[in-house]
Image (spheres, rainbow, N blue to C red):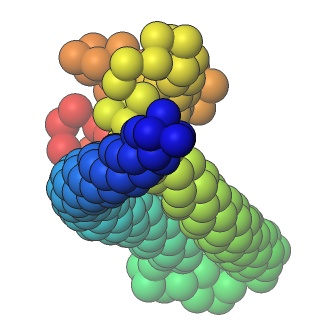
Amino acid sequence: MPQDKDDSVRSALDDILNIESDRVKAEDDAKRKREEEARRAKEAAEKAARDAEERRVREEEERRVAEERRQRDEESRKLHLRQLEELRVKQESAAKAHLQEEEMRLKHEQQLAVLDAQKKKIPIWVWAVIGVVIVGGGGIGTYLYIDSQRQEEEAAAALRATQQRAEQQRIEQEKRLVKEREERQKTEREMQVLMAQLAANQQKTDELSAQLLAAAGDAEKTRQLQEEMKRLRDEQEALKTQQDNIKSGRPGRPGRPGTPSAPVTRTQKCVNRGTPLEECFMCPGDPRC
């Protein structure tokens, strides 16, 4: 029976050793688990810190880009308003100067017509001669009276014709001014549409710039964004060219900066050329004036 006793002792010892081994293994497993959890917590904290820093940098960059875009839009809007005001003042000044020139010319023609009519009236000495002739012979006096009446009627008709021409020219001038005002308003509307398109295009360009920063490392997406950026820049240049053409008064045609436009010369017909009044009253545009 000693053999059975030894086996019992050995079995009990093995059980004790197994229990100790399980305890040590459980402690090791718990230690590894705690270390793994600590490592994961540390990595999670580091990742959260990196994400927070990247988010802060990205938001700061987006705020900077948005502020720059807002400043550019504000400067562009002020420039557009200033250009429209300068264009309006320039066109109104030109129209006012042209209207004053037309009024002076019409007034001059009316004065000449009045003088012409006065010169055609019979002077006092003619009436004296008529009186003498009437005393001597009524036939000659009657003839002179009829001729003087005819001359007065011709002078009145000439004055009426001049006034009619002046009125017609005034109406045409008003029509030209209305047309110029409509063209100026159309130009302002076209400029406003172009400025809105330029602002929208610039906003898209800024957004693409931010996307390019965020897509660093992605070659395919970067290539697509660069192609889109090139297309937007081409559109921007086309819009600016169209804007310059509208400012120069040649929509649809490329302007040539630096080339002065040919001066516009106005030729006015002198109504007194070849008459005695030409020496007394110079005609508009006459080099002797």
The total of numbered circles placed on residues is 0
Residue at 59% from the left image edge and 55% from the top image edge: 193
Residue located 53% across and 84% down the image: 127
Q: From what the image shows, is residue 146 above or below residue 83? A: below
Tell me: 166 left or right of 65. right
Q: Is residue 119 above or below residue 29?
A: below
At x 62%, y 25%, the residue is 252
- Whether 39 is drawn above or below 79: the answer is above
Q: In the picture provided, is 239 more to the left or to the right than 147?
A: left
Instruction: Report x, y in % for residue 40.
Output: 31, 51
Task: Tell which of 277 and 180 is nearer to you.
Answer: 180
Q: In the image, is residue 188 above or below residue 236?
A: below
Comparing 87 with 80, the one in front is 80
Residue 175 visible in the picture = yes
Q: Nearer the viewer, residue 187 or 151?
A: 187
The x and y percentages for residue 138 are 77, 82
Nearer to the camera, 25 or 128: 25
> Percent position (x, y) of residue 183?
62, 56
Residue 113: % across, % down: 52, 67
Residue 90: image quadrant is bottom left
**Residue placed at 19% from the left, 44% from the top?**
289
**Residue 237, can we see it?**
no
